[in-house]
Amino acid sequence: MTRALLSSVLIAFLCLAALVGNPSPGQAAPKSKMQRLRVDYRRFLDKARTPRETISYTLEHSKWRVIDPSAGKVETLKAGERVVFVNQGRTALYVVVGKDSLEKVGANIIASHIDTPSPRLFLGNLTKGSQNVLVAGAHGGIKGAHWLRRPLVISGQVIKADGTALDIQLGEKDDFAFFIEKRGNGNYQVRVGSVSATDNSDSWPSFVGILNTRYGINADDLRSSELYLVPKAGSRAVGVERMMVGAHGQDDRVNSYLAWRSVSEIKGTPRRTAIAWLVDREETGSRGRSGARSRFLELVYSYLLRSQGGAVTEARLHRAFAASQALSADTPACVNPNWPEVHESKHGPLLGRGPAIFPGTGRRGKVGGSQANAELIAKVLRIFSTAKVPVQTAELGRVDEGGGGTIAKDLAHRGIDTVDLGVCVIAMHSPFEISSVKDLSWTLRGFGAWLKN
């Protein structure tokens, strides 16, 4: 081989190595633990956009044994076993069985909600001529102006007349989208087409027509549907250093993801049983069979108590609840630079300063909320400090200005010592909320320390 040819081959090899070893900035392989957390979290956000999708995602990626707590026969669960209890595909409790008795020492719980504020379609009584503009109502406290003329996709589930359950996604991988064109009477008008029923239907597919082609669905099937509108755009890294994440529904998928990750990453067997509860319906008051006000937690606790021996009495159940402690991992609003006046200036949580602990929820004198005791707050701060996690002390909003609810009151009502703590986001309840990757990393470490304490 001549020297010139050898030089050419060497140059080509070095160029190829540079291309392989240095991908484009948008595709750079994550190097640090924090960068990998950002990538994994964004993947979760893009795949788990509804409560059902969230439960499916966590089940698929944890591969824990699923147990039906309503089953007559109870299995003996050994210390260290990892099991999950699922309720209607919308709520799940991930449990690592502890060494000590649940009745005597209780459990360490992290509870967070997986439903997000978004429009939900009303699809009853569709006709051939009424498919271009559909009607949607609000799930949770959304502001309609945020959603106007924003590209949206449809995601959810339809149950056919024969009982077949079909997961529906329309627009996410297509070259079309839907949009809300106006609001009226408290609802939203959703534009999904423009061709009138008198045009050649063979040339222009209708809304029901495309669902029929893809899923075998007809108009009557849509009366038993649970379909949400979510932004077509997926999550985004925000900032040139990519240390923020922007996406819809980080309230409260951010804390739900971290709760699930923290219980999944427990090594060995904790002394107390560790639980991550991913729960539905918080944005609408936690009512309903899959909400925190349901008795599913009682059902799971009863199963765990029976698995440790003996009949379950009301007294045993209440003792187990009273011995337990919980973090209600919900999302407070970070101070928004555009609206700082709605926050209490000394107690407004700031992006990138660590998770925020807020002892009281509710509004106007904490009516309708829960109030954590000082002993539990001190314990949480001590555990997080030992794990080298900074914690902000915060309020949900300025006195008589802001406020809100979480599932803390539903846990406390059962006798479980509970305090609210979670990652804050900017522009909460908008279609593009912003979180800090530093806050995610700190909170994951703190959650892990809490569960293993």
Image (cartoon, rainbow, N blue to C red):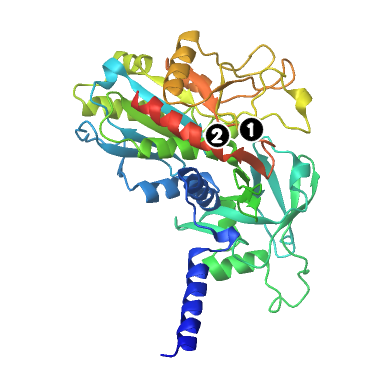
Q: Quadrant of residue 315?
A: top left
Q: Is residue 29 visible?
A: yes
Query: Quarter holding the N terminus?
Result: bottom left
Say whether marks 1 and 2 touch (CB < 8 Å): yes
Disc 1 target residue: 351
Around disc 1, counting alpha carbons within 10 Å, would you say few (fewer than 14), some (14 to 19), or many (20 or more)? many
Residue ID at (45%, 28%): 446
Q: Is residue 245 above or below residue 103?
A: below
Query: Quarter holding the C terminus?
Result: top left
Q: Is residue 276 above or below residue 414?
A: below
Estimate the x, y position of residue 34 in percent, counting from the top left: 49, 43
Q: Is residue 290 visible?
A: no
Residue ID at (64%, 40%): 434
Estimate the x, y position of residue 237 in percent, counting from the top left: 61, 49
Q: Which mark is residue 439?
A: 2
Q: Amino acid at mark 2?
A: Asp
Q: Amino acid at mark 1?
A: Leu
Q: Which mark is residue 206?
A: none
Around disc 2, counting alpha carbons within 10 Å, would you say few (fewer than 14), some (14 to 19), or many (20 or more)? many
